[in-house]
Image: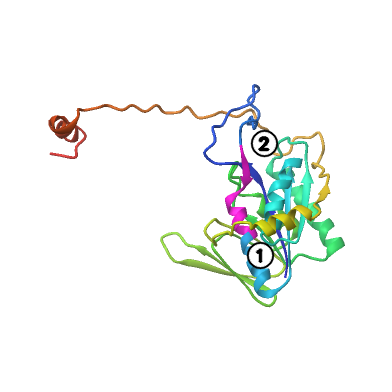
Amino acid sequence: MNILVCVKRVPQTGGRIVLTADGQAIDTKFLGFTVSPHEECGVEEAVRIVEAGGGSVTVLTLGPAEAEDVLRDALAIGAERAVLLETDGAEWDPVSTAHAITEAVRAQEASNGPFDLIVFGNESADTGGFQVGIRVAVALDRPIATGLKGLTVGTGSVVARREAPGGGWETYQLSLPAVVSVKEGINLPRYPSVPGRLRAKRKEIERVAPVRPGAGVAVGPSKAGLRVPVEEGAAVEILGRGAEAAPAVVDMLARIGVLR
């Protein structure tokens, strides 16, 4: 089983988001970065499939040179090859990203053989576009199932499971080669071991310069700017201390409708 996993380097959750002066991008000077959580599970799932049935895992990302870190994390837990579609750090829209990944897949398959399975995260943690994996599948003319919480690989096909609205499961059988997008919770990703990290440091990362489709021409909607939501303030009212606060607490509970 030859598997490709596409991942994305995203800001760590919990960090304070600050925009650049022109409002066109996030100022990343004070942000830490990590791999998008859904895609972290995608790497783990691919490694488990190969560990159980043989094959190899290639991991690919589009991003600046610093995105090498997320590729080495994937190499440390069992991926064999890594490809960086190296950009200058400027933002890429979903259409351009899908185009670059599609061209990279075609080039990789021409030189290293076809991928049986291409794995995406269901959506990235920063932009949440939900569309890159679908666009790549359509461009490659391959079946796709999204939002998956279960994968079982068989001979020539993969059985994909996702949670259905209201409970229960939806099950799909896709002929290989296929594209899937998985959700966080499909597995519990392992933590890279020290020996794994040392091996990953020695592995070479293939670098490719991606080309945007129709260079100089806007593709799809254009971005006017970004806006950080207004933070809601919070206030604390001290009702009293010790037993003397009891009447005030009762009055407060009555005001908010807990006591009648």
Does residue 59 show up?
A: no
* Rendered image quadrant of residue 249: top left
Quick one: label 2, few (<14), some, or many (20+) residues within 10 Å? few
Distance from the alpha carbon under mark 2 to that under mark 1: 37 Å
* Rendered image quadrant of residue 151: bottom right
* Residue 217 located left or right of residue 245: right
Decide which of 4, 204 is in the foreground and name it: 204
Q: Residue 174 placed where, x, y %?
A: 64, 69
Disc 1: which residue: 47
Q: Secondary structure at mark 1?
A: helix
Does residue 117 show up?
A: yes
Q: Residue 5 placed where, x, y %?
A: 69, 58
Disc 2: which residue: 221
Q: Residue 230 placed where, x, y %?
A: 47, 27
The answer to whether residue 49 is above or below residue 208 is below
Residue type at mark 1?
Val
Query: Which quadrant of the rendered structure holds the N terminus?
Result: bottom right
Q: Secondary structure at mark 2?
A: loop
Q: Residue furthest bottom?
A: 155
Q: Which residues are magenta?
A: 32-43
* Rendered image quadrant of residue 188: bottom right
